[in-house]
Amino acid sequence: MNTSSNTAAVASAKRAVDPSKCLVELRNIKKAFGGVHAVDDVSLNLYPGEVVAVLGHNGAGKSTLMKMLAGAYPIDSGDVVISGEKVHVRTPADAQNLGIESIYQTLALADNLDSVANLFLGRELLTKWRTLDDHRMDAEARKVFHRLNKNFTNVRIPVRRLSGGQRQVVAISRAIYFNAQILIMDEPTAALGPEETAMVGNLIQQLKAEGVGIFLISHDMHDVFALSDRLSVMKNGKLVGTYRTQDVTEDEVLGMIILGKQPTGKTQTERPAR
Amino acid sequence: MDTMMQSIKRAQVDWRMVLMSGVLVVIALVFNILSDGIFLSAENLYNIAQQTAVVGILATIMVLIIVTRHIDLSVGSVLGFVGVLIAYLMYTENWSWQAASLAGLAAAIAAAVYQGALVAFVGVPAFVVTLGGLMSFRGAAYLVADGKTQPLSDPFFLKLGGGFNGGIGTQASWIIGAVLCVGLIVSMVAKRRAKKAYGVPTNSALVDTVIVLIPIAIVLAFVAVMNAYQIPNKPEPQGIPIPVLIWGAVALVISFLVHKTRFGRYIFAMGGNPDAAALVGIPVRKVTILLFLLLAVLTTIAAIVAISRLNAGTNSLGNNLELLVIAATVIGGTALAGGSGTIIGSVLGALIMQSIDSGMLLLDISIGTRYIIIGQVLIAAVVFDVAYRKWTGDVL
């Protein structure tokens, strides 16, 4: 898949990717809501072309951690390092400028707007008069939707009337159209049928091949073992451990999620297998 | 026939607007029969258009406020406050109308910044903020001139509200009508060209021709009717009343903002899904404040029209106006749940409400009965709205 040819209009040029260089480092991240430590001293990293699954119960802090990286929540303390540079992610716009895109469980779509408007929401293409360039957005949107789903043509009706799969196409298109370097996927297959789940799986493989780093939040063990290179488990806001997916069994992962117990005899790893 | 249906479907006709226009026509015809042809006389239509202007101007912006899931209950009181202030500065302080109007605008902006900041930055529900404003600004309207009526006499200023010298004359009316028609055609041609250039599917030429001819016919008919009305002891027919011209310009500008700018897009996104709007990086607070500032500008314009129509500013100016404005907006198909509403709908809603009221007045129906009926029309409009959304699958 060639994303760059369709996105010549977008300012952010694709950076050269060095697969051995760390793409994202989250260092000692902390976040408290009131007295509750939602995220407590968590460190994670992500390499280009790698999928790191982030696991844990509801309330374990994984979504909060990812929302901080996406600029939706302010970070209390800790550092975010992107491609070796320390950065400040204060707003969703900051994150987008750093090449971080998010696909949320709730899909973050404006239900009353059509697919084209949702794809470009917050980053509309403008004419030289600074008005919305509706027709250019329409044409660009049709191209990117078509790549993900050939049957998706009713792009000008409100997204609330679309199927779960079509809505997911819109949400994912937001990430790929704007050349995400770092992609956060929060339960990307939760609302999808088998065919659409396979589509998301294929897409993840394609993005990996292009060197995109992906954080995958999922409850689905099948997805985790099929798609991820490494997995990190959180419990009560703390990191239980990070392992190569191939090194651990499903039972050991469930033990980490439920009991917070590190599997015996397995070594943690900061790097993907090469 | 099938291809016809297909092209109609693709043309994305707003059936709600078509239906509402039909309702307006039926109302007019029924009242016309009941009143022995008085309702559809040029004089009556001229008066209805002129009387609707203040509510109509405010309804255009109320659409956007309600779309973002807010409400403004203070709009009538702020209008009263600003109106009395302008009249007071002109009558008691001898200011020019320009200076007085600018001072009124400054006061409206101060009120909007205060209320808007409470909503956008402190997070107080707009219902509460503007309910307080409803009372406080009514009080302020009283304090400005100590409750005394402030009469107006500036001849130019009085034209802004319509009335005896408030028409722009036949020639200017035809010129404005012609400009609008040319504008409609040019924008349709440009739209078709742009769609072709980007390979976006276009309507058939026939469908687009019909789509552009209908508003042209309405514009020309409107101009013809306004030009047909002549006040008995005047040598010239009236032409388009200035307040209606102001209303039309306001509706065009707001429609432009809605369809062609990021501001309009963000307003609808915030109403459709506030969480999503924040997550994709829309500056929600800034947009909210801008919306209140726009409201301040339009409230000032409406206040100027209102006092010049009345030839005076009084502390009761705009009493209960907020109810009429919200009713017009709701009758025009704006959903109180947010995220959905149109400017043209607010225009139709205001016209429907004023037509029913004027029609009943012509038939000598008592004020009590009129209030009862208008209230039930509002409910009928919302019942229809709920049914229509269920039918189209656009359940909010």
Image: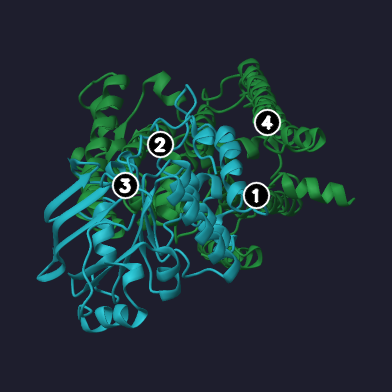
Chain colours: A cyan, B green
User: Is A229 above or below relative to B248?
Assistant: below
Kind of residue at badge 4: Val
**To which chain does the residue with label 2 belong?**
B
Give the labeled residue for mark 1: B17
Q: Are marks 4 and 1 on the same chain?
A: yes
Give the labeled residue for mark 4: B219
In depth, the one of B256 and B132 nearer the eye is B256
Tag nearer the camera, 1 or 2: 1
SS assignment at label 1: helix
Question: x and y percent of residue A186 in the render?
Answer: 38, 63
Q: Are marks 4 and 3 on the same chain?
A: yes
Give the labeled residue for mark 3: B284
Question: x and y percent of residue A243 in the render?
Answer: 27, 67
In depth, the one of B89 and B232 nearer the eye is B89
Mark 4 burial class by Cα count in 10 Å: few <14, some 14-19, many 20+: some
Kind of residue at badge 2: Ala
> Residue A67's image quarter?
bottom left
Q: Is residue B268 visible?
A: no
Question: x and y percent of residue B302 in the render?
Answer: 40, 36
Kind of residue at badge 1: Met
Q: Earlier in the sequence, mark 3 or mark 1?
A: 1
User: Is B309 above or below relative to A88?
Assistant: above
Circles 1, 2 touching at the beta carbon (< 8 Å): no
Tag nearer the camera, 3 or 1: 3
- On screen, residue B356 versus residue B22, left or right, reads left
- C-alpha gap between disc 4 and disc 1: 16 Å
Give the labeled residue for mark 2: B302
